[in-house]
Image: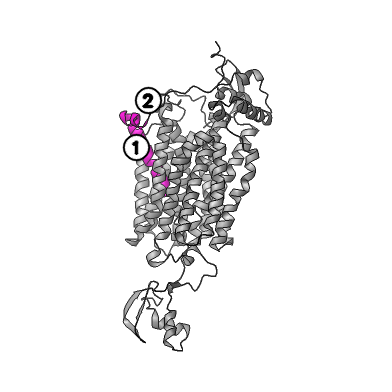
């Protein structure tokens, strides 16, 4: 009998409010770190811009000739067919003379005549043979994200998502500032690797903390709101990078805000659900009372005393996913979708300077267009369904990536407009993927499946900067490759089941498409009182807003 009187946290959440003032405040607090992360993930694009450069040939002054700077360059640096100076070659110096029929690589570094402020490219000479180190360093940042997901994900389960967020913010801020004082490129790359790991810790923990406090029917809405704040951060990035051209100062200014969130120690709530699972019932009661008070709800001590950890079904593993043909198909297709989302999204975002227009304005538009694109998912996912939206976004992005290389570079506006549309569709695709993936897998293997898919996305992020290196073979290859992969992902989506208005599947015996429809509970944006009966027989009236 005593066991029957226990109350699970999901039922108690309906009593204190599933998306009241407390949850809205929590989502707002989580939006701020989401706003800051673009400064780290995309900022290097603006501190490694292309600049005019040529070999440092000051050695000619040792000959004792009285030459002007123009004469020195004419005698030491060969010219291209268009009359501009060669960037990576110089004439071979001899004993008191020059060999005009022989050239060699730059010996003593490079000169950057048009750079008033030091950039990462000019200070660490990321030109010519060292040019590819820029893309490699971005890939190492993404590798940090992968390692962070592997390390901080399980650690978050042990110490709690709140503590993980605070720790990750400290890492991101302190190591980000440290990168601004890096004495060489390799120290900079190592510090940025830690920043990438911290980004993973923040992302995983924020998603967990939000989902553990927000009612199931409001979780997609909360997720999309935080995604929109990330888009706003991309817009702010354009202004910050435009105003601060010194790369060290930019790195410091972009990182300090993460440390300024130290006040989260006092206001960011722990997950009551996590506290309950850890047996910290009294601490959980304290947080629940606070949430109920902010939501202007009352919760009796009798109900709190019934609080108990939720019973969990035995989880499956990756092998279970591969044993069942329909689950194997779902896993491989969704993993490819996550991989393509990340690869193409970062592939386009990290090569904003390749589209021909001012990169600051382009970045501003990139962020601005993501706001309506991501917000539209709230309505389109219900109107068109998850499968059609996911396929449509990827197909649109794929077609655009294939069109861009066909447009001459003399039409940069047309290229940029297409790139902006593609970026918007990829942002919406990412938001759709989060919702779709959570619904398509059975409960007993959902976390395992999402972990596998997230791993695929991280690999895509690592490869995204490296795709740009293929332009040395042919300038069209990177975009064509991204386009083909996005099209393949869009086509594969049609082999997935539709999960709109379907109950979540708990076991592995049937596909989601065979689940009963729950249209009344999942109508497009239901705004009205809904009576739900908890497991303790308590009827709670809530305001439902469902995807």
Queried whether the magenta region covers residue 536, the answer comes back as no
Residue 41 appears in the figure = yes
Front residue of 68/389: it is 68
Residue depicted at 35% across the width and 39% down the height: 492
Look at the picture and state if 31 lies above or below 61. above
Label 2 CA crowd tier, 10 Å (few <14, some 14–19, many 20+): some
Q: Where residue 529 appears, x then y in whole percent?
A: 61, 24
The residue where tag 1 is placed is 332
Q: Residue at x 46, y 60 (%)?
A: 185
Q: Are marks 1 and 2 in contact (CB under 8 Å)?
A: no
Q: In the rendered image, which residue does mark 2 sit on?
A: 508
Q: Position of residue 316 (x, y in %)?
A: 38, 27
Q: Quadrant of the N terminus?
A: top right
Q: Is residue 229 above or below residue 128?
A: above
Q: Residue at x 42, y 52 (%)?
A: 140
Residue drawn at (54%, 36%), measured in percent from left and top?
Answer: 161
* Boundaries of the magenta span: 317-345
Q: Secondary structure at mark 2?
A: loop
Question: Main SS of the magenta segment?
Answer: helix
Quadrant assignment, res 276: top right
Q: Report if residue 395 is visible in the image.
A: no
Query: Where in the figure is residue 28, as x and y percent of width and height?
Result: 61, 40
Q: Is residue 22 left or right of residue 331?
A: right
Badge 1 local density, few (<14 within 10 Å), some, or many (20+)? some
Q: Position of residue 141 (x, y in %)?
A: 45, 51
Above/below status of 531 relative to 343? above
Q: Secondary structure at mark 1?
A: helix
Q: Nearer the viewer, residue 161 or 471?
A: 161
- Colour approach in the figure: one colour
Number of marks drawn: 2
Residue sitting nearer the eye, 322 or 511? 322
Q: CA distance from mark 1 to mark 2?
A: 16 Å
């Amino acid at each position: 009998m005593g066991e029957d009187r226990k109350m699970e946290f999901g039922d108690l959440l309906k009593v204190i409010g599933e998306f009241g003032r407390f949850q809205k405040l929590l989502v707002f607090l989580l939006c701020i770190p989401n706003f800051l992360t673009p400064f780290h993930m995309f900022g290097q694009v603006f501190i490694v811009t292309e600049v005019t450069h040529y070999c440092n040939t000051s050695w000619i002054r040792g000959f004792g000739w009285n030459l002007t700077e123009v004469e020195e360059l004419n005698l030491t640096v060969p010219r291209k067919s268009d009359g501009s100076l060669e960037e990576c070659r110089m004439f071979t110096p001899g004993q008191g003379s020059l060999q005009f029929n022989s050239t060699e690589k730059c010996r003593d570094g490079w000169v950057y005549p048009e750079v008033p402020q030091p950039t990462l490219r000019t200070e660490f000479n990321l030109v010519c043979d060292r040019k590819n180190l820029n893309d490699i360093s971005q890939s190492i940042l993404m590798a940090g994200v992968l390692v962070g997901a592997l390390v901080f994900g399980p650690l978050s389960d042990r110490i709690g998502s709140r503590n993980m967020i605070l720790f990750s913010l400290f890492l991101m801020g302190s190591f980000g500032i440290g990168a601004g004082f890096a004495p060489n490129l390799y120290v900079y790359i190592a510090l940025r690797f830690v920043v990438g790991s911290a980004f993973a810790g923040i992302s995983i923990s924020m998603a967990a903390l939000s989902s553990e406090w927000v009612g199931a029917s409001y979780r997609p809405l909360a997720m999309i709101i935080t995604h929109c704040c990330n888009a706003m951060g991309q817009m702010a990035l354009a202004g910050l990078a435009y105003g601060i051209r010194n790369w060290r100062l930019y790195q410091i200014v972009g990182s300090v805000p993460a440390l300024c969130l130290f006040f989260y120690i006092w206001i960011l709530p722990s997950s009551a659900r996590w506290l309950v699972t850890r047996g910290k019932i009294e601490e959980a009661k304290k947080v629940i009372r606070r949430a109920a008070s902010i939501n202007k709800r009352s919760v009796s001590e009798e109900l709190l005393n019934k609080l108990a950890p939720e019973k969990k079904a035995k989880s499956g593993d990756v092998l279970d996913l591969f044993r069942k043909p329909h689950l194997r198909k779902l896993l491989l297709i969704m993993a490819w979708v996550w991989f393509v989302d990340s690869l193409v999204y970062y592939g386009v975002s990290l090569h904003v300077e390749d589209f021909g227009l001012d990169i600051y304005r382009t970045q501003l538009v990139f962020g601005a267009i993501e706001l309506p694109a991501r917000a539209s998912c709230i309505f389109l996912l219900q109107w068109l369904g998850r499968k059609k939206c996911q396929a449509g976004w990827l197909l649109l992005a794929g077609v655009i990536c294939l069109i861009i290389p066909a447009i001459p570079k003399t039409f940069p506006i047309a290229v940029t407009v297409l790139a902006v549309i593609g970026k918007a569709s990829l942002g919406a695709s990412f938001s759709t993927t989060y919702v779709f993936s959570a619904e398509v897998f059975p409960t007993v293997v959902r976390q395992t499946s999402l972990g596998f898919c997230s791993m695929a996305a991280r690999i895509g992020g690592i490869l995204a900067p490296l795709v740009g290196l293929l332009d040395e073979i042919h300038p069209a290859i990177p975009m064509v490759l991204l386009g083909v992969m996005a099209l393949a992902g869009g086509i594969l989506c049609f082999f997935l089941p539709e999960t709109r208005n379907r109950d979540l599947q708990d076991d592995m015996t049937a596909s989601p498409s065979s689940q009963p429809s729950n249209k009344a509970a999942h109508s497009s944006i239901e705004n009205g009182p809904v009576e739900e009966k908890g497991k303790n027989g308590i009827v709670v009236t809530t305001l439902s807003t469902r995807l």
